[in-house]
Amino acid sequence: MSPTQNAWRTAELRARGIFTGRVLSNDSLCPEHYRIRIGLESFPPTRPGQFINIRCGGYRGRVPLLRRPFSLAGRRDASDGSVELDILYRVVGAGTAWLAGLETDAQIDLIGPLGNGFAIREDKPQAALVGGGTGIGPMIYLAEALAAAGRAVAAFAGARTASTMPLIEKQKETFAITTDDGSMGHAGMVHEAFSRWLDNEKPRPAELVVYACGPEAMMKAVADICTPDGIECQLAMERHMACGMGTCQGCAIKVKTDEPPGWMFKLVCKDGPVFDAEELVWE
Ligand SMILES: Cc1cc2nc3c(=O)[nH]c(=O)nc-3n(C[C@H](O)[C@H](O)[C@H](O)COP(=O)(O)OP(=O)(O)OC[C@H]3O[C@@H](n4cnc5c(N)ncnc54)[C@H](O)[C@@H]3O)c2cc1C
Ligand code: FES
């Protein structure tokens, strides 16, 4: 972990807690994705790449025992201290189906903020963001944070097809869009669009930091583009999670070490979910 990330962890991470929020809106963005806006009386500081653990109710007789993790896709702070959090989510099972059924004003129980989040580099004026599927959510939040910090941002968003692209109209102006079938934006994979941008723009590697979140194959492809040129690349990894706080050891990920056997396990919930690409052992 970089010194910047470490400083953030020690200063801010202990501020997490259990909160009861209120659903402000819960909109279907496309046949697969929803965006929920949660209102809270207060919430600790957060950074893009961090996540919250939501207690989900049941759906058709299936009640998830464990909380479900979701990355922050946006945050707005009001002058009275109240906070709005956005989550962009895809319905895949009982927990997310329950979430999709929540109506405005419903109560929502969550723990957060969890994980380390992306580090915004003081020494790197340029950023490239690569998001795929639900991985676009944290990229929306990150694009806003980077723009506020005065960084030049090139952002790329990929989906299988136009009807599964979870961006709203306004956000489509921020992202260069790709779809596998060419039904929206450029045809092809999102990492290919990022690679073309690198070839055309030729940013200086030392001045660029790349952030990615999405399917693991996409993130490995982004890492494979960045690593040979010495471009810093931060990836938000995903594993199945139980506690989300480093207790159950259920979200292990292999990282490189100098000592034999050359690797060790870290925890995605506690040490991540954001890791430097060069640190990871891909399997
Ligand atoms: C750090 C982190 C951040 C996440 N952020 C988001 C987000 O912003 N938006 C979003 O839609 N989803 C996100 N996820 C995934 C989300 O947590 C799962 O989709 C959710 O827990 C599924 O719950 P469920 O009860 O609906 O489905 P379940 O019934 O639990 O599972 C349905 C299917 O999804 C698979 N699945 C469940 N969790 C995961 C996982 N973590 N990785 C891979 N496959 C999984 C299961 O194997 C099963 O096949 C994130 C996961 C992690 C670890
Ligand atoms: S989810 Fe329990 S240790 Fe990571």
Image (tube, rainbow, N blue to C red):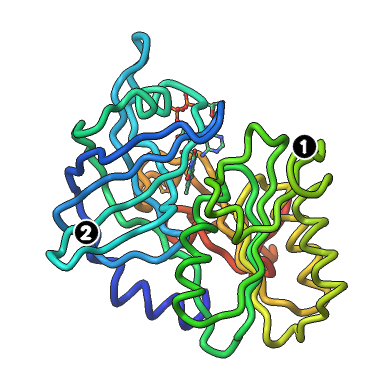
Q: Nearer the viewer, residue 117 or 240?
A: 117
Residue 132 to residue 27: above or below: below
Q: Nearer the viewer, residue 220 or 76?
A: 76
- Residue 114 in the figure: left or right of residue 40: right
Residue name at image x 31 percent, y 38 percent: 25
In the picture, the disc for residue 183 is 1
Q: Position of residue 277 (x, y in %)?
A: 67, 66
The answer to whether any part of residue 26 appears in the image is: yes
Q: Position of residue 103 (x, y in %)?
A: 27, 27
Q: Amino acid at mark 2?
A: Phe
Query: Of the residues under marks 1 and 2, which one precedes in the sequence?
Result: 2
| Number of marks in picture | 2
Label 1 – label 2 distance at C-alpha: 39 Å
According to the image, label 2 marks what residue?
43
* Secondary structure under the numbered disc 2 in the rendered image: loop
Q: Position of residue 23 (x, y in %)?
A: 25, 38
Instruction: Give yes or no for contact between labels 1 and 2 (Cβ–Cβ under 8 Å).
Output: no
Mark in front: 1 vs 2: 1
Picture quadrant where residue 48 is located:
bottom left
Residue 43 to residue 189: above or below: below
* Secondary structure under the numbered disc 1 in the rendered image: loop
